[in-house]
Image: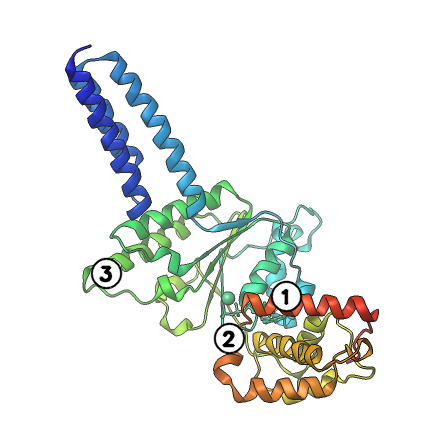
Amino acid sequence: MKKAPYIAITVATLILLASIASAVIVNTDLLSPAVISNLYLASMTGYIALSAVAVILGIVSLTFNTFLNQNEIGSIELEVKTKFSDVVIPNEVKEQLEIICGNMSEDKKSKFKILNCKQPKGYLLYGPPGNGKTSIARAVAGEAKVPFFSISGSDFVKEYVGSGVRCVKEFFAKARQNAPCIVFIDEMDAIGTKRTFGNSVSQDRAQTLTRLLIEMDGFKENKDIVIIAATNCIEALDPALLREGRFSEKIFIDFPDCNSRNQILEKNINSTPCEEGLNLKEIAEKTEGFSGAKLSYLVDKAKLIAANRAKEEKELKLTIEDFNTAFEKVKVNPHLSEAQPSDSIQNMSNALSNFITYVSGGIVPTS
Ligand SMILES: Nc1ncnc2c1ncn2[C@@H]1O[C@H](COP(=O)(O)OP(=O)(O)OP(=O)(O)O)[C@@H](O)[C@H]1O
Ligand SMILES: [Mg+2]
């Protein structure tokens, strides 16, 4: 063999390695540069063997690229277990969302199908943090029995110019592949703030948002894909997003009222044993202004306090004193209380809850 093919193969391989490295580090499309440069080298040197190497390298890079993209864009939950009954949802909100489930369900006798109701493309859930926006979006997918394809708006904000636009395109291409599905974009404000055309960063962000608008326009109102977005600050969003035909449905998810707080407490206590006659209404009444997440945190705290307090098995149950102590701690530490329980606290609390249930046989709380 002459020297030329060796040099060409070495160059081709180096190009491929560089392409893989650039794909991993700066998230570029590695397929095109690797294959094109390999084929170019093959045609320049005229060796069939080199063309074959180019094709093999191309297949490798295609596989790698597909693998990378699969892991990269959004996350998909094919079968969502959360249902409307798992989340405390105000009736008027549930009514608005039931149209999605009715339209997407297989049931031909659904009242929405019979009346041929037009399915809005986009729903924007907005309101203060921790009141169930994400949980509600997931419950819609669970109730409609379709996959839940989710991404955070901040995942579209990339370090390198042009990557955000590419990411939006790929995300929606993947959504189409998985239709019918619920597409959920969390933290919409990370990508959807009002466009300004100043420096290159804001220009890139504006282009990413423009791409999102184009993708939304590309969806027909065919009931196969419904986009739900969530934000804490609707006022920061670009008006183009909010117009009819895009996120025409805006649903305010407010702090829970007393009755809802009572239900959220019940759901979080679940099967944890409680002292007889524990009055959750009393706790619901004094937790005005608490978000759902804060109530969930309160229950977790009360469980930990109960576990620490109990000296013997029969004392392993939640009491009103545990809640009062937890309430004082959560109330005086607003910084902590707004946060959702970390995974470790949540896991510890679940483990304790299971343990308490196991050893004491379980008394269902009364409200
Ligand atoms: N309406 C609710 N019903 C039941 N649980 C709730 C509700 N709201 C909040 N929670 C509890 O709080 C946790 C956080 O809720 P979720 O993530 O849905 O809030 P969010 O509105 O999306 O918050 P953020 O705006 O910060 O993203 C839930 O896992 C749940 O334990
Ligand atoms: Mg959320």
* Residue at 71% from the left image edge and 69% from the top image edge: 353
How many C-alpha atoms fall within 10 Å of the one at disc 1: few (<14), some, or many (≥20)? few
How many C-alpha atoms fall within 10 Å of the one at disc 2: few (<14), some, or many (≥20)? few
> What residue is disc 1 on?
95
* Residue at 16% from the left image edge and 11% from the top image edge: 2
**Mark seen at residue 201:** 3
- Tag in front: 2 or 3: 2
* Measured Cα–Cα span from mark 1 to mark 2: 29 Å
- Tag in front: 3 or 1: 3
- Which of 126/50 is in front? 50
Q: Position of residue 180 (x, y in %)?
A: 56, 45
Q: Position of residue 281 (x, y in %)?
A: 72, 85
Query: Residue 4's image quarter?
Result: top left
Relative placement, left or right, of 306 versus 54 is right
How many C-alpha atoms fall within 10 Å of the one at disc 3: few (<14), some, or many (≥20)? some
Going by the numbered disc 2, the residue's amino acid type is Ala
Whichever of labels 1 and 2 marks the residue nearer the N terminus, that label is 1
**Mark seen at residue 339:** 2
Going by the numbered disc 1, the residue's amino acid type is Glu
**Looking at the image, can residue 74 be seen?**
yes
Going by the numbered disc 3, the residue's amino acid type is Val
Determine contact: label 1, label 2, CB under 8 Å.
no
Q: Secondary structure at mark 3?
A: helix
